[in-house]
Amino acid sequence: MEGFPFFRKKTLPPEDEAVRAAYLQHFERRIARRTSLRELSFVVMDTETTGLDLKKDHLLSIAALKIQGFQIDISQRFEAFFQREDYQPNTSVTVHGILNKHLATGTGEKEIMHHLLGFLQNSIIVGHHIAFDVAMLNRSLKKYFALELKNRTFDTAWLARRVESPVLSHYRSVSLDKLCEQYRIPLGERHTAAGDAYITALLFLKLLGRLEQRKVVKLGDL
């Protein structure tokens, strides 16, 4: 195996191994499919990045808030700007508005990942087209803590389609703006991580309400 380094487990410093172990401990017992949706903890998340290329683009900001008992818990929220000394605003700045001054006093990527894991624990992650956000976070988590997120995820684009049709014959992506218009949700601070996380949380609650009316009340029902 000495000639094949990719087979060897990455050795982490003790403090990083402790962070990794503390996170993984939350998944020693799986959430039962019979668990009521109202009993679950959800974390609605959004990230802003320099672009959509998973190989070369970088995280700029992240925001997340918790939903428990079908209510947004405003006392439990997470928001951070990543410190990027080499950040050069490109065309994406017209979307998210993040400038050098926002990142000059930002927090180191490793520290943000550490605190994010503690915030998430085993909550179900929710987001609009959440697969991209998770992939970006996993890239950082693998770099610093040799792990990927183990949390279940729900995509509000998929859930919206689920509300329209109990049987998903095909997946049709729908924009967050379109769904907000459909469900009469004010857009507010659109295209900021915090603003989009809050808007997505409102959409998620409306979708859960529609599903509950159809007797979709347990995790396994989804």
Image (cartoon, rainbow, N blue to C red):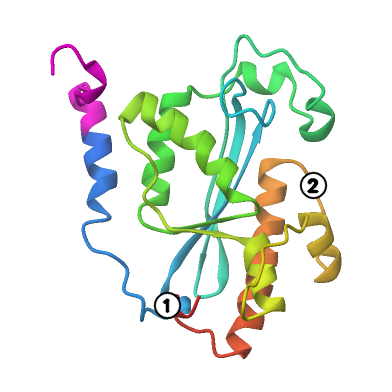
Which residue is located at x 69 percent, y 69 percent? 160
Task: Tell me the CA gap for discs 2 and 1.
Answer: 32 Å
Residue 13 position, x and y percent, is: 21, 21
Q: Position of residue 93 (x, y in %)?
A: 79, 26
Q: Amino acid at mark 1?
A: Gly
Point out which mark residue 111 bears.
none
Disc 2 secondary structure class: loop
Magenta part of the chain: 1-17
Question: Up-down: is 46 above or below 186?
Answer: above
Q: Quadrant of residue 138?
A: top left
Q: Nearer the viewer, mark 2 or mark 1?
A: 1
Q: Name the residue carrying label 2.
A: 190
Residue at x 63%, y 63% (from the top left corner): 158
- Asked which secondary structure carries label 1, the reply is helix
Q: Earlier in the sequence, mark 2 or mark 1?
A: 2
Task: Give the answer, above or below, for where 204 lies relative to 50.
Answer: below
Q: Residue at x 47, y 80 (%)?
A: 221
Q: Position of residue 91 (x, y in %)?
A: 82, 23
Q: How many marks?
A: 2
Which labelled disc corresponds to residue 220? Answer: 1
